[in-house]
Structure formats: structure tokens, C-alpha cells
Amino acid sequence: HGLWRRSVLFYRVVNELAEKLKAIFVPFYRVILDTLVKHLGAAVAESQGDRRGISKARKRRKGENSERYDEKHSEAGAAAARELADQATHAVSKLFLFDSDQEVATESRLLELVEPLASQLESTFNLDVPDYRTRIAETVVPCVSQLAVCGSSYDVWKPLNHALLSRSRSDRPAVRTAALVCVEALFSKLAEEYLVLLPETIPFLAELMEDDDIEVEALVKKLVKRIEDLSGEKLTNYL
């Protein structure tokens, strides 16, 4: 994971420069955005135990297969993947924040980033549940919220909403709660504008209302209440 460590250092510099230069720095993202997408996907694949995140050249090095398999499942490997995902996610979040004219963050580029960001909900990076939830709240939620603000269109919101809500069908309660936290953040951030996604959202909420996990059930009821406050309409008949 030496290359990843160097990439982490690079993205730290990117984040510092983006924070200082703001919109002036946005054009530089044209150079690095493809790599950002690849690194997000590779980090998630590593966390989920998926060898697709490893290059074909490394796959061919059969003599090292066992050693690399062990490393992938080590705490050090998970930590490297997590740090790469964190720094890359912060970097794209700053693009969404400062590229208000969508000079680089065009609709097509935003759509490319939906799955790499949403799939992080399924990636624990060997964290325990409290630390996993903290990471989601501090890293993923702000990023997907800013993506929605930057995209500001149904064509971006619909696939984002679906990608998040599809994780609410995970067999892990922590992932289901994380999905709900993300969607609740989108309704909070975009308010009435996001109600256009209500028809696609209701079937997922209806399923979760009967969830066996107490925390999931409480979160979905909280989300339903927020939607009702925004819409001025009771959702009882739809759930």
C-alpha cells in the first residue's frame, strides 16, 4: 500500500490548496478527477474484500498472492484504504463546494461519483460500529449532501437517492441506519426541493417501518416526520 500512502499525502495537499484557493483551484480537478474516482473505488473494493480494486499487473504476481491476501485483511491494510477513501472523499467534497458554476463538476462527472460515494456505506474499513458511524457522519454525509447541492437537478438527485436507499436493504443494521442518515441529510439540506424524490423514497420507507432493529425503526420515523413537516401532508396512507 505504499502507492496509497503517497496518494493520501497528495490528496492532503489537494485539500489544503482547495481550501485556501477555493474556486481558483477548481480547474486543477480536471487533471485529477479520473484518478480520484479510481482511488475511491479501489479503497472501497479493498474494504469489501474485492480484488477488482487491484491492478491486473499485481494479480499476475502469483508468488505474492498469499502475502497480499493477508495484508489486505490486516488492520494496516484497512487503515490505508480508509485514509485514502477519507482524503479522496474530502477532495471531491471541496470540488462540489467550490465549483458553483459546474465548470468541472458537470452532471456526467457527478453521476460518475454517485456509486463510489454511496458504496462507502457498505465499507466498514475494519471499524467498530461507533467509529463507522462517526466516519459516515463526518465524511460521507457532508460529501453526498454537497454533491446534491452542486448537482441541483432531478437527473442527479434521483440516482443519488436510489444509490443511498438501496443500501437501506443491507442485512447489517449499521448500514441501514447510515443510509437513512444520508437521506435525512438530503431532505434537511434541500428541503422542499427534494420532495420531488418522494415517490421513489416511499417504498423504501414503508419497508423500513417494520424493521427489526429498534434504531433503524426510530430513524425512519424521524425521517417520515421531517418529510411530513416539509410537505405539510401525512404519509400514513402511503406507508
Image (cartoon, rainbow, N blue to C red):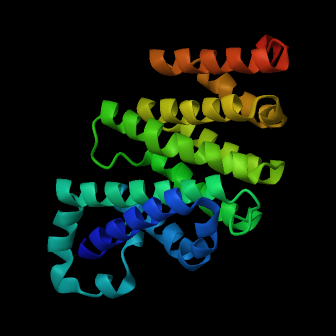
Q: Residue 209: tell me if it is visible.
A: no
**Total marks in image:** 0
* 23 to 158, vertically: above or below: below
- Based on the displayed image, in which of its 4 quarters is residue 208 positioned? top right
Q: Quadrant of the N terminus?
A: bottom left
Q: Residue 232: tell me if it is visible.
A: yes
- Based on the displayed image, in which of its 4 quarters is residue 228 positioned? top right
The image position of residue 138, as x and y in percent, is: 44, 39
Identify which residue is drawn at 49% across, 34% down: 178
Q: Quadrant of the C terminus?
A: top right
The image position of residue 129, as x and y in percent, is: 32, 33
* 12 to 167, vertically: above or below: below
- Based on the displayed image, in which of its 4 quarters is residue 33 positioned? bottom right
Identify which residue is drawn at 27% across, 36% down: 128
Q: Is residue 196 left or right of residue 95?
A: right
* 149 to 51, vertically: above or below: above
Identify which residue is drawn at 38% across, 35% down: 134
**Which is more toward the observer, 171 or 150?**
150
Q: Is residue 191 left or right of residue 6?
A: right
Identify which residue is drawn at 66% across, 35% down: 186
**Which is more toward the observer, 166 or 218?**
218
The image position of residue 80, as x and y in percent, is: 27, 60
Q: Is residue 190 left or right of residue 84?
A: right
The image position of residue 113, as x and y in percent, is: 60, 60
* 33 to 121, vertically: above or below: below
